[in-house]
Amino acid sequence: MQIGDKRKIVGVAMSAYLVAALLLFLDTYIHVRLLQETLERISRAYAAFHLVGT
C-alpha cells in the first residue's frame, strides 16, 4: 500500500467522522427543541387544570 492510498483512506475516514459528528449534533439539537416544546405544553396544560381545580 502506498502513501497516497493511505492518505485517501484517512481522508475518507475523517470525512465520515465529521459527517457523523454533525449528524449527532443536529439530532441532539432537534431532540432538545422537541423536549422544550413538550415541557412548555405540559406546563400550560398543568396551569389550565390547576386553575380549574382550585
Image (cartoon, grey):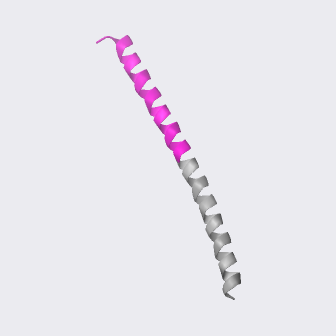
- Residue at position x 57%, y 58% in the image: 35
Q: From what the image shows, is residue 21 above or below residue 31? A: above
Q: From what the image shows, is residue 31 above or below residue 1? A: below
Q: Specify whether residue 22 is painted magenta.
A: yes
Most common SS among magenta residues: helix
Of residue 54 and residue 39, the one placed in the foreground of this image is: 54
Q: Position of residue 38 (x, y in %)?
A: 60, 62
Q: Position of residue 23 (x, y in %)?
A: 51, 39
Q: Specify whether residue 20 is painted magenta.
A: yes
17 relative to 28 in the view: left or right: left
Examine the image and state in which quarter residue 32 appears: bottom right
Q: From what the image shows, is residue 50 above or below residue 7? A: below
Looking at the image, which residue sits at the far front?
52
Looking at the image, which residue sits at the far bottom?
54
Q: Which residues are magenta?
A: 1-27
Of residue 2 and residue 14, the one placed in the foreground of this image is: 14
Examine the image and state in which quarter residue 45 appears: bottom right
